């Protein structure tokens, strides 16, 4: 189903939803995230696949988030994610710390329809004391002592990301960003904003088909030119480093964050925000 | 010095923001062209096509020999902390809890060498393992696996390392100075390697070598 705008996607995401989101370098649907802020969604639970950045910081700062499960939240070169950092330090959100491959593994379990999956490493980490839902079991196939971590599958309510193309058949093209395919496979519903509509069916193009997430997994799409801005789309536009640096500075205080939000052109007339 | 630690590795991966280890890796590659270097943050021609899980899958299979990890805190038992300390929240553990115990040779790297970063015991163990070494802006430590204790191998400049280090460690009676790069290594660093690094770490290359 093709919707008219990013706002239509945001309206389809209810309060309290568990939303799987990609890292800042892997095409977050920023235009939809801004609509979630505008709509004042509440008690969202974010899953970082496997880490989070600006999209999570905006939602946390705007009071939309109750809980975050992630391996990290940061703005990369621009430094700490200020609204996440303050909310975590003040205990205003629940933070369920994880480690990158544990999140990938939990989603891959859901892809396969199995209840859990094992993963090496992690055993000496304090994560093991905090994550009561993770279990250490003996490798059932080994005669020697071989403890191994088992993580339960995670099935997000919503997968939300941006794509380079959608097509008339309801497929989307993500190229090499295969973590987006994993979250689409694992989520109950998948919403994708996209840069451009391609005529026809991308699965009929042998060169593009390997980068496609098939319409089987896609609930709805919506056009959003420059929809990842101020983050980037490989080969199309780069991360707007200057804007990220501006945000990192502005959002250091609650007042500064509010001023940053007030600068937005919420009317959408410019389909963009002041740089 | 990091280049010497990398030694005869076949495949080395560099994570998020590590221009200095990346520089060492490219220096080694000049001498050992067969060394494969996978930069997680490579902007063009990135080596990964299966998304961000591929690095971890490679490690799980034993296809990566050397990896670098840092920490907001690193302690005397070689634990690293990327989560919280003194009421402050840091970004999080990233992949460290998995990478550290699974990669055969993990090199801990932290430029700041102070009692703030090198502590007796971290407040939160993001990851623990048996590292190959700890490299800081002031010194090189090797890890004594049986004793679970650091050994000071060398210092980059004469000075009181113990005063700047929050954990206890072993040290020889005379601590040698870290060997400086040879003239030939320096020349390679400043030419070929600098250009390779500038492609993915432009700010670092500008600061260190004045490359724009």
Image (cartoon, coloured by chain):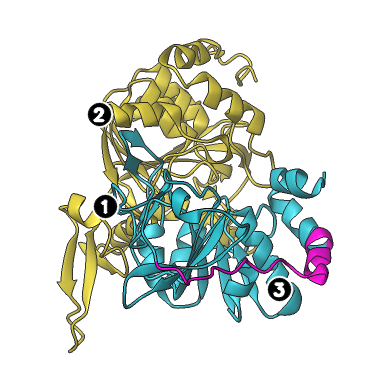
Q: Which circle, 1 or 2, is nearer the viewer?
A: 2
Output the letter for the chain in yellow. A
Callout 3 secondary element: helix
The mark total stands at 3
Callout 2 secondary element: loop
Quadrant in which the N terminus of chain B appears: bottom right
User: Mark 1, chain letter?
Assistant: A
Is residue B32 left or right of A183 when viewed as pictured? Answer: right
The residue tagged 1 is: A154
The residue tagged 2 is: A91
User: Mark 2, chain letter?
Assistant: A
Q: Is residue B32 above or below residue B79?
A: below
Q: Residues within 10 Å of mark 3 (few under 14, many from 20)?
A: some
Output the letter for the chain in cyan. B
Q: Which mark is residue B29?
A: 3
Q: Quadrant of residue A64?
A: top left
Q: Residue at x 17, y 62 (%)?
A: A135
User: Mark 3, chain letter?
Assistant: B
Q: Which mark is residue A33?
A: none
Is residue B64 left or right of B29 when viewed as pictured? Answer: left
Q: Nearer the viewer, residue A25 or B153?
A: B153
Q: Residue at x 49, y 45 (%)?
A: A170
Residue B187 in the magenta stretch? The answer is yes
Q: CA distance from mark 3 to mark 2?
A: 47 Å
> Which residues are drawn in magenta?
B170-191
Q: Earlier in the sequence, mark 1 or mark 2?
A: 2
Q: Is residue A162 above or below residue B16?
A: above
- Percent coordinates x, y for residue B15 in the rendering: 54, 57
Q: Residue furthest bottom?
A: A143
């Amino acid at each position: 189903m093709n919707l008219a705008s990013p706002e239509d996607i945001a309206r389809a995401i209810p309060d309290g939803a568990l939303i799987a989101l990609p890292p800042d370098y892997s095409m977050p649907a920023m235009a939809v995230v801004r609509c979630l802020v505008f709509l004042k969604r509440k008690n969202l639970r974010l899953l970082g696949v496997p880490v989070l950045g600006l999209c999570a910081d905006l939602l946390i700062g705007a009071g939309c988030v109750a809980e975050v499960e992630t391996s990290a939240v940061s703005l990369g070169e621009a430094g700490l994610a200020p609204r996440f950092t303050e909310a975590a330090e003040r205990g205003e959100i629940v933070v369920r710390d994880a480690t990158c491959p544990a999140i990938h593994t939990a989603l891959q379990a859901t892809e396969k329809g199995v209840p859990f999956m094992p993963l090496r490493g992690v055993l000496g980490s304090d994560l093991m004391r905090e994550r009561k839902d993770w279990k250490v079991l003996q490798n059932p196939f080994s005669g020697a002592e071989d403890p191994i971590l088992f993580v339960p599958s995670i099935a997000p309510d919503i997968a939300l990301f941006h794509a380079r193309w959608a097509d008339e058949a309801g497929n989307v093209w993500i190229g090499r960003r295969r973590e987006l395919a994993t979250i689409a496979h694992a989520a109950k519903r998948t919403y994708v904003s996209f840069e451009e509509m391609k005529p026809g069916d991308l699965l009929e193009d042998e060169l593009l088909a390997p980068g496609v997430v098939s319409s089987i997994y896609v609930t709805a799409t919506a056009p959003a030119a420059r929809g990842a801005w101020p983050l980037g789309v490989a080969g199309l536009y780069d991360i707007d480093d200057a804007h990220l640096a501006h945000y990192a500075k502005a959002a250091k205080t609650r007042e500064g964050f509010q001023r940053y939000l007030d600068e937005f052109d919420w009317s959408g007339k410019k389909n963009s925000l002041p740089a | 010095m990091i280049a010497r630690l990398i030694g005869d590795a076949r495949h080395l991966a560099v994570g998020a923001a590590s221009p200095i280890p990346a520089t060492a890796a490219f220096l080694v590659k000049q001498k050992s062209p067969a060394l494969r270097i996978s930069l997680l943050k490579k902007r063009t021609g990135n080596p990964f096509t299966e998304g961000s899980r591929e690095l971890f899958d490679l490690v799980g299979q034993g296809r990566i020999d050397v990896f670098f990890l840092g920490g907001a805190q690193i302690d005397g038992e070689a634990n690293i902390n990327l989560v919280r300390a003194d009421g402050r929240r840091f970004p999080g553990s990233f992949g460290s809890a998995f990478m550290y115990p699974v990669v055969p040779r993990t090199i801990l790297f932290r430029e700041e060498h102070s009692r703030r970063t090198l502590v007796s015991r971290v407040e939160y163990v993001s990851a623990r393992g048996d590292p190959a070494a700890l490299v800081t802006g002031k010194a090189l430590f090797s890890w004594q696996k049986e004793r679970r204790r650091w050994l000071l191998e060398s210092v980059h400049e004469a000075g009181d390392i113990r005063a700047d280090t929050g954990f206890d460690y072993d040290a020889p009676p005379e601590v040698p100075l870290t060997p400086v790069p040879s003239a030939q290594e320096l020349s390679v660093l400043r030419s070929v390697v600098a250009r390779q690094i500038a492609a993915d770490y432009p700010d670092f290359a500008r600061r260190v070598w004045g490359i724009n």
